[in-house]
C-alpha cells in the first residue's frame, strides 16, 4: 500500500523567504506526482503535475522536483507572499488512484 | 479552465435520511471521483467512475453508492446517513490517461445530526 508523508506538518516564514516543502512516498512505481493547494474550507487547486519520467516541473514562482528512485519530491516556492498561506498537499498516482499526504500548512507572515 | 461544481457548500441532514451529493464538470472528462476528507485521516477515495454508467469502489465505499447516468454528472448517495459520515466531501474529474491531473470542486461540508 502506498504511504505518502509530508514533513513538516506546519511551517511559518516571513514574507520574501523561499519555501521548501517535502513529500516522500514508499512505492516508486508511480505514474506521476501532483501538488495541490487547499485554502481553509475549500477544495483543492492543482498546482503542478510531474510525470514519472520527469525530474522537475516549473510554473511561475513554483518549482517541483521528483526523485522517483528515492521516493521524494520537493516543492519550492520562491519569494513567498502572504497570499501563499495555505495547506499544500502532494499526491502520487498509481493508475487512476491518488494517494495523498496529510499536507503542510504554510503561514507567510507580512 | 476546468470547472467542477458541487451542488451544495454546506448541508445538514438527519440520521437515517437518504442524502444526495451532486457534482458536475464542464470539460467532457471521462473520469470522476468522490473523496472524503477528515482531520487526521486525510483524503480517502470513496468511489471512482471511469465512464458513463461505470463505477469502481475506492478505499471506503461502505455506506455509499454512486450514479453516473450522464458524462458530466456524478452523484454520491448516502443510503441511510449516519453521524460517522459527517465530513467534507470532494468531487474531482480528469481526462482519461496516465498523466492527466485531477481537478477538484470546492467541496460539500456535510453534517449528519
Image (spheres, coloured by chain):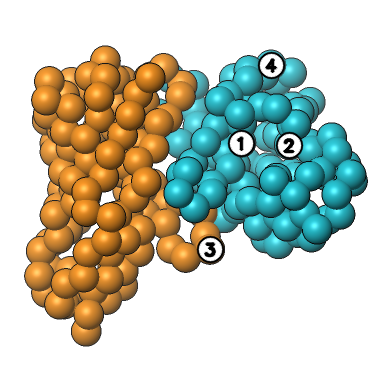
Chain colours: A orange, B cyan
Q: For the residues marked 2 and 4, what is the alpha-carbon distance in whole angstroms?
A: 14 Å
Tell me the chain of label 2: B
Circle 2 or circle 4, nearest the eye: 2
Residue B58 or B84: which is nearer the viewer? B84
Q: Earlier in the sequence, mark 2 or mark 1?
A: 1
- Residue at (49% x, 53% y) in the render: B39
Disc 1 is placed on an element classified as strand
Tell me the chain of label 1: B
Q: Earlier in the sequence, mark 4 or mark 1?
A: 1
Tell me the chain of label 4: B
Q: Quadrant of residue B53?
A: top right
Q: Is residue A98 left or right of residue B84?
A: left
Disc 3 is placed on an element classified as loop
Q: For the residues marked 4 and 3, what is the alpha-carbon distance in whole angstroms?
A: 30 Å
Q: Position of residue A12 (x, y in %)?
A: 21, 70
Q: Residues within 10 Å of mark 1 (few under 14, many from 20)?
A: many
Q: For the residues marked 2 and 1, what is the alpha-carbon distance in whole angstroms?
A: 7 Å
Q: Is residue A99 above or below residue B54?
A: below
Q: Residues within 10 Å of mark 2 (few under 14, many from 20)?
A: many
Q: Earlier in the sequence, mark 2 or mark 4?
A: 4
Residue at label 2?
A: B76
Q: Residues within 10 Å of mark 4 (few under 14, many from 20)?
A: few
Q: Which mark is on residue A41?
A: 3
Q: Quadrant of residue A53?
A: top left
Circle 4 or circle 1, nearest the eye: 1
Disc 4 is placed on an element classified as loop
Residue at label 4?
A: B54
Residue at label 1?
A: B34
Amino acid at each position: 500500500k502506498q504511504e505518502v508523508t509530508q514533513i513538516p506538518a506546519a511551517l511559518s516564514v516571513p514574507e520574501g523567504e523561499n519555501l521548501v516543502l517535502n513529500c516522500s512516498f514508499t512505492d516508486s512505481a508511480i505514474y506521476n506526482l501532483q501538488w495541490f493547494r487547499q485554502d481553509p474550507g475549500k477544495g483543492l487547486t492543482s498546482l503542478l503535475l510531474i510525470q514519472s519520467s520527469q525530474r522537475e516541473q516549473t510554473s511561475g514562482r513554483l518549482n517541483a522536483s521528483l526523485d522517483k528512485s528515492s521516493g521524494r519530491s520537493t516543492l519550492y516556492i520562491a519569494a513567498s507572499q502572504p497570499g501563499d498561506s495555505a495547506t499544500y498537499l502532494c499526491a502520487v498516482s498509481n493508475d487512476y488512484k491518488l494517494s495523498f499526504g496529510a499536507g503542510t500548512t504554510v503561514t507567510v507572515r507580512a | 479552465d476546468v470547472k467542477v461544481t458541487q451542488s451544495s457548500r454546506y448541508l445538514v441532514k438527519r440520521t437515517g435520511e437518504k442524502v444526495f451529493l451532486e457534482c458536475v464538470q464542464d470539460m467532457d472528462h471521462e473520469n470522476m471521483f468522490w473523496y472524503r476528507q477528515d482531520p487526521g485521516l486525510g483524503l480517502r477515495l470513496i468511489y471512482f467512475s471511469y465512464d458513463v454508467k461505470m463505477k469502481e469502489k475506492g478505499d471506503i465505499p461502505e455506506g455509499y453508492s454512486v450514479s453516473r447516468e450522464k458524462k458530466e454528472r456524478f452523484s454520491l448517495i448516502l443510503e441511510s446517513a449516519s453521524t460517522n459520515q459527517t465530513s467534507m466531501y470532494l468531487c474531482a474529474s480528469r481526462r482519461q490517461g496516465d498523466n492527466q491531473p485531477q481537478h477538484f470542486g470546492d467541496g460539500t461540508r456535510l453534517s449528519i445530526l
